[in-house]
Image (cartoon, rainbow, N blue to C red):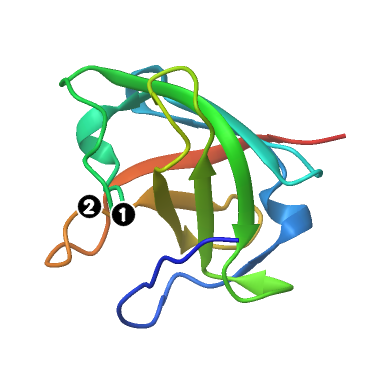
């Protein structure tokens, strides 16, 4: 589905699809909702928090909103979630993609948008409600 490549091993652990599905929130009102059907919606994510692959990112310094398809990078469990954005919201077309990495697994998992290869973590979102 996606053609992103991550560098280095993820040391934050791995999550299954079941553990990813649900609502995740971050500082300043950021929100990502992952659905069991492989779709996601996000809003309020700082533009500077997301590093996009292949193409120029949406312009501006504000907050991003949009949705698309998600999948685990390594099959059944993974430390990386691949996001492919649909046209709509902050995205004029469907050419954008990005990665979320697992910072912490377990009962209160934390994901982050990796934006700086010299920094271990970026903008974080924490699961607040699994899908029921």
Q: Residues within 10 Å of mark 2 (few under 14, many from 20)?
A: some
Relative to residue 9, is residue 58 drawn left or right?
A: left
> Of discs 2 and 1, which sits in the foreground?
1
Give the residue furthest to the left: 118
Give the residue furthest to the right: 132
Considering the numbered disc 2 on the image, is that residue within a helix, a strand or a loop? loop
Residue 19, label in figure: none
Asked which quadrant contains residue 58, the reply is top left
Q: Nearer the viewer, residue 102 or 52?
A: 52
Q: Which of 27 and 98 is in front in this view?
A: 98
- Image point 60% across, 61% down: which residue? 1
Asked which quadrant contains residue 16, the reply is bottom right
Considering the numbered disc 1 on the image, is that residue within a helix, a strand or a loop? loop
Relative to residue 81, is residue 69 drawn left or right?
A: right
- Image point 80% across, 44% down: which residue? 36
Which residue in the structure is indicated by mark 1? 53
Q: Which of marks 2 and 1 is nearer the N terminus?
A: 1
Q: Which of 54 and 28 is in front in this view?
A: 54
Residue 12, percent across and down? 45, 70
Which residue in the structure is indicated by mark 2? 115
């Amino acid at each position: 589905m996606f053609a992103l490549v991550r560098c280095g091993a993820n040391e934050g652990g791995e999550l299954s699809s079941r553990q990813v599905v649900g609502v995740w929130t971050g500082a300043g009102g950021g929100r990502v909702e992952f659905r069991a059907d492989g779709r996601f919606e996000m809003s309020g994510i700082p533009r500077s928090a997301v590093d996009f692959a292949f193409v120029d990112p949406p312009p501006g310094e504000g907050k991003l909103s949009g949705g698309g398809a998600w999948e685990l990078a390594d099959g059944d469990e993974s430390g990386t979630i691949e996001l492919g954005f649909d046209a709509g919201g902050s995205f004029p077309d469907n050419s954008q993609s990005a990665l979320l990495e697992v910072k912490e697994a377990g009962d209160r998992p934390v994901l982050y948008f990796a934006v700086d290869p010299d920094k271990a973590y970026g903008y974080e979102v924490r699961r607040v409600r699994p899908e029921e």
